[in-house]
Image (spheres, coloured by chain):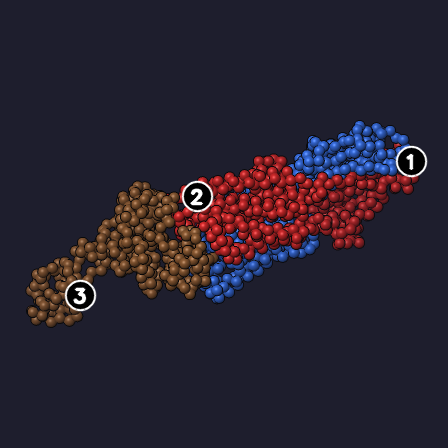
Chain colours: A red, B blue, C brown
Amino acid sequence: MFKTIFFYRSKALLRSKETMFWSLLFPMLLGTLFYFTFTNILEGEGFETVPVGLVDTGQYENEEAFLGALESVSGMDDERTDEGSGDILFNVTKAENEEEAEKLLSEGKISGYILLGEDIGLVVNKSGYGATIIKSFLDYFKQKMSTVENLMEATAGKITPDQLEEALQTREYVKEIKVSEESPNIVVNYFYTLLAMSCMFASMAGVAEITGIQANQSPLAARLNIVPAPKLKVFLGSAAALAVIQTAIIALVFLFLALVLRVDFGKDYLLTMLTNIAGVITGISFGTAVGAVLRAGENLKTGICSALVMLGCYLAGMMDVQMKYRVQANMPVIAKINPVNRLTDAYYSLYYYDTNGRYWQNMAALGIMTLIFLTVTFLVIRRQQYESI
Amino acid sequence: MKVFSAYFKVLRKNIVGIAIYMLVFLVVVIFSTLGNQSDETTGFEETKTALTIINEDGDHAMTAGLIAYLQEHSVSAEVKNDREMIQDALFFRVTEYVLRIPEGFSENFGRDGELSLEKTAIGQSFGSVYVDSMVNRYLNTWRVYQELAGDMAPDKIQEYVKEDIEKEAAVSLGSGDTSENHGYSMSYYFNMAAYSTLSVIIIGVCIVMGSFYQKDLKRRIQCSPIRTTKMNVILAGANLIFAFAVFALNILVGFVIFGRKIFSTAGIFMCLNLFIFTIATLSISMLVVLVVKSKAAQNAAANTISLGMCFLGGAFVPQFLLGDSIKLLASFTPAYWYIKANNEIDLLETYTLDTMQGILTCYAVEAGFAVAIFSLALFISKQRAMAGYSSQGKQ
Amino acid sequence: MVIKVENLVKRYGELIALDHFNMELREGEILGLLGPNGSGKTTAINCILSLLKYDKGEIQVFDKKMSPVAYDIKQDIGIVMQNVAVFNELTVYENIDYFCSLYVPDKKKRQEMVEEAIAFAGLGEFRKFYPHKLSGGLLRRLNIACGIAHKPKLVILDEPTVAVDPQSRNNILEGIVKLNKQGATILYTSHYMEEVDQICTRIAIMDRGKVISSGTNEELKSMIGLGEKITVDVPGISREAVEGIRALPNISKVELSGNTLVVKSKKGRNNLGAVLHYLEDHNIAFGKLYSELPTLNDVFLEITGKELRDNV
């Protein structure tokens, strides 16, 4: 009987072409979007030239050195380039006086202006990317000037400009050591949450599965309640079919991410597949638990499921990976019981660690969650008589 | 107006679901906004990175000075010097940056066979780049003194280096009205609101309109003497009220977070922007409900569209980080223009027709999207009505 | 006894759906459970099937207490629900096979049964059709085939002919009789009197949650004292003649309205002759004349009253 139920349920699922189509297409579409968004960020193409104003009162003692340094990283306004690439950090607009610079600033045409008075000053309206870049440039210049002054004083001016120039060449003193074979890469986390989300969206089908077996929800369900077999058996056959089909969908999404978009999933694809399966089962059981516990229409249950999954994705860092760490730091319990976070961590462990201890820890957590969801589901659907149909 | 009242009856029946949905997405938006606070304060407070230093070099003045300097500008995170422990600490962000000072580092400093410091960090985060630059500045400066100042005593060098690298440019605030710039970022809130607006309106419209688009009911409506266009206009009107309620809720939450700041000039322009975007979202929803029919698929559609647009448009990832090609792609979605407008409003201090030009363009493009998408939806719905849905079979 | 229900009480909040409902179904019977909409027929069936909780009462099926886990009892029940309950994504054949598989694990045996059920329901040429391609009548027949393919000893049909064209309806009714001849005991609910009249060996009339009358249809008809009804056009009949007819044996009621005389008899089928003789003997000219036997409809309306029920 299990076999026949499984067989026909699979058939029926495969024939709901619209649902199949969308549940395959959407994650791939999102994955592609992620890909384009994050590839660009990684390649650093996106850094914009910062528009900066300059008010030179002629009072600054190192005026010449400063203007030289500024020029080397800028396009001045007469030779402005729109290519935001290369070494050009700033687009400098010279202003006659402070009022003019102030006007440019308030109109949003510059991120801030440099005031060359007796000292170097920076005037901004608010912090932000542009202001930070300008400030670090100014800091760096002042620090170098200070070094040069101190040296001159200590050596009583015995240093030649050539010597100085050579010594001032900067060197890199930090060498990156990978803690694992894979360099930690935050971007993969976005794709992992995406795959985790796809797994957890099986919960929607789980809700439908439960609706399909509760006599008070549909005539077909009522029909299934009077067959000479425990409801659990019918449910399991049906849910198993669902799990297999969903796993197949997720496998395709995973292969698309790994092979087409070249997202790094570590080396052990078998374990990644195992994670996918665990994710689908967690998703379905989450859906059946929600479907069984809530007394509401299918619409509402599906909506709630989807909202909860999205909340999980958010807390697992899907929209902003920093969120994941904020949750980790401030509300570790939430991070522990969030299945999306656990799934994401499982994928990440395979990619990042060279041992699988952390991976199995996450898988065990998913197993426990599934067990809880299923227990809740069974406890509710075991109640086989209804107040009204 | 029976159609009209029927709409709100269906809406009322589903209000709990939509409310829960709304709540979840508001939580997302509020959380993000509150969590994003420090980015907008004007005082240039440096973000302190969680830093772990493993010193195997002993007690040399240079190393000690470096460590002291770094510790002053970061948060110390104690991690055991063990590969797996370090992996874990990085994984869970207990530390963001592990710096190992190898044995003999100061001894060989500035000579042939110079050693490097070893860092292990989580990607190219802002914090890790910042620590890199602190280390490099300190050591480069030290090297300049060591090379050029002859036999200056390490303690003396240390003193000079410290003096140099603590130098900072003075930052002052412009004369613009900067009182608004403290606290939580309003533009960030409004950017995030694109997400809740898209999610909630698409789902809500799908749920309610789904009832009206049931096959038999749809046929019955088609048989009634109300013209399809008129019917659609009435439904669009009802949807508009729903959308307006979602908009009002967004503004209300904004008011709770920002108080009267939301009624400042910038606030008003952002509200107006959100309003136009809400209308554009509404027309998207009406298209979705026509094209995507199964319930599960509608949910997936709502999530994909809202997530996709928000990523692409720069609600989650700041727009300035997006590459040109992605921005070009994004410019085919209303979310991009909405967020662009918010960012520009945020930068603006004086509002004249001249300075507002970019913002007004964004408004116009968003409105254009709203009209175009709504027309497309109307067109499809009319085509469907004529085709009589015959291919759908019966049941 | 196939089904025995004693003092079944079911409340939906304030509303009493079943009020000390009693029913017996003996082996080999076709019992028609008749009642207006909302009288509690479907509720009674759902209670018998242990789908619904009930407040009070005893239900036995095949002389055993019925419960949700009485799988041995369920094995021998076939159910045809009021609402069509089939999978939209499965074909006619697959649907029947699916439901049959829940009762009959053996694949070979099942194959035969499914074929028989398809032949029985006349769905031969539609076996590869999806439900949404079937007409209303065919869909109902599929619904029935799914319920009876496993050859149950007890078949419960809950208004299986709702919204079905006359051809399909006859096909369905004939099928039910055939099932009965093959040995199945049948519980049949309907609010179509002719159907019940046509196929049932015994009838129970329900109203407001209880059986108010039961027996064979003859028994029911005689129980309410209704016999033949004779209608005759008699232009210009005298008052004496009317009284004369009223005095004939077995006549219960004589009414004259305009030129039409309606004569109702207490029982029997041969009262027409007596009236005819009387008219001829007294030289009374008459036009159109016809006689009707009482229908179950008359019985039903007589017992349950004539008001519309759906809004009760």
Looking at the picture, how far across and down is residue B80, in whole percent?
70, 31
Report the Cα–Cα distance between label 2 and label 1: 89 Å
Label 1 vs label 3, nearer the camera: 3
Report the Cα–Cα distance between label 1 and label 3: 140 Å
Chain of the residue displaying label 3: C
The tag on residue C291 is: 3
Looking at the picture, how far across and down is residue A389, in whole percent?
38, 48
Circle 1 SS class: loop
What amino acid is found at the position of numbered circle 2 in the picture?
Answer: Ile
* Residue at x 51%, y 48% (from the top left corner): A240
Q: Which of C101 and A368 is in front in this view?
A: C101
What amino acid is found at the position of numbered circle 1 in the picture?
Answer: Gly
Name the residue tied to disc 2.
Answer: A381
Label 3 vs label 2, nearer the camera: 2
Q: Is residue C311 visible?
A: no
* Residue at x 47%, y 45% (from the top left corner): A291
* Residue at x 9%, y 68% (from the top left corner): C277
What amino acid is found at the position of numbered circle 3 in the picture?
Answer: Ser
The tag on residue A96 is: none
Name the residue tied to disc 1.
Answer: A157
